[in-house]
Amino acid sequence: MIEEKLHEVQQKIAAAKEKRSPEIQDEVLLIGVTKNHDVNAMREAIDAGVTDIGENRIQEAKEKYAILDRNVTWHLIGHLQTNKVKHAVKLFDMIHSVDSLHLAEALNKAAGEIGKHQKILIQVNLAKEDSKSGIYEEDLAELLQQVDNMENLQLMGLMCIAPNYEDVEMCRPLFRKMRKIFEKVKEMQWQRANIIYLSMGMTHDYEIAVEEGANILRVGTGIFGQRQY
Ligand SMILES: *Cc1c(COP(=O)(O)O)cnc(C)c1O
């Protein structure tokens, strides 16, 4: 079941890549978002070819991390509280949700304490939704520069969550704008950063995200079915 759904998603990604404008050549990394799904579902997905998984809560990830007997890359995609950074740097290969100087400083310190270079993305709240985390576009450049100076962080790119529009086509201009911002950020002068990732697109909008230049997708429902809360 998971395997079939995964293959369906992979096929849709391949088809969406064909619709991109020719200057966008990026490979696409698919993250299977396993929040609220159990370790058996994770195993099934990994055995079917999922290489990267996304979780949004530290406690849940910790419990799964302890019992998951598979090699996989872990992504934190949900909001992170400063008091949980110690756990976050131990568990996650990449943290997508960095959106303030305060949080970046805490992560830098926690990563230093365990001798790690923590890969991070900066989350941008492009639509300025009150309900979402993320830094506003006008404050982005300053935060990027500050993070680039932090010796235990490796800045790898940007992440965004599009609003949950009923008409999914409304996401397109937003994704297009994010890709433009990403291109600009890539061209900036960096000390430590290696800007290669643009994480955008979830189950309802990932095809449009790919068409507009996403190179990391975070898909839960499309692979695992509805979450039970
Ligand atoms: C839950 C979640 C996803 C996956 O959502 P689906 O609609 O199930 O694909 C992606 N990104 C973030 C930040 C999430 O919290």
Image (spheres, rainbow, N blue to C red):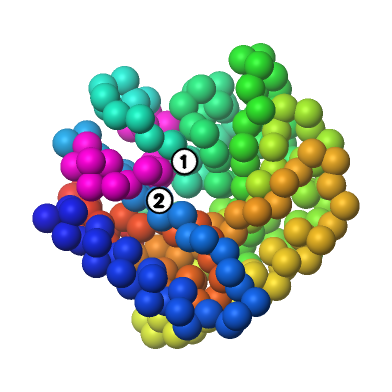
Task: Tell me if residue 193 comes above or below residue 8 in the rendering.
Answer: above
Does the image show residue 126?
A: yes
Would you identify the image quadrant in which residue 107 lies? Answer: top right
Work out how far the residue at label 1 is from the one at label 2, CA to CA, in angstroms.
Answer: 8 Å
Relative to 95, is 191 on the left or the right? right
Q: Which residue is mark 1?
A: 75
Callout 2 amino acid: Ile
Residue assigned mark 2: 31
Rendered location of residue 46, percent (x, y):
27, 41
The answer to whether mark 1 is within 8 Å of ligand 1 is: no
Choose between 218 and 49: the one closer to the eye: 49
At mark 2, the secondary structure is strand
Could you tell whether 161 is left or right of 110 in the image?
left
- Ligand 1 within 8 angstroms of badge 2 C-beta: yes
At 77% from the left and 60% from the top, the residue drawn is 185
Q: Which of 37/68 is in front?
A: 68
| Residue 47 highlighted magenta (yes or no) | yes
- Above or below residue 29? Residue 172 is below
At horizontal 46% and vertical 55% (from top left) the residue drawn is 29
Q: Quadrant of residue 86?
A: top right
Disc number placed over residue 6 in the picture, else none? none
Amino acid carrying mark 1 in the image: His
When the figure is inspected, residue 53 is found, relative to residue 218, above or below; the finding is above
Q: Which residues are magenta?
A: 43-61
Query: In front here: 53 or 71?
Result: 71
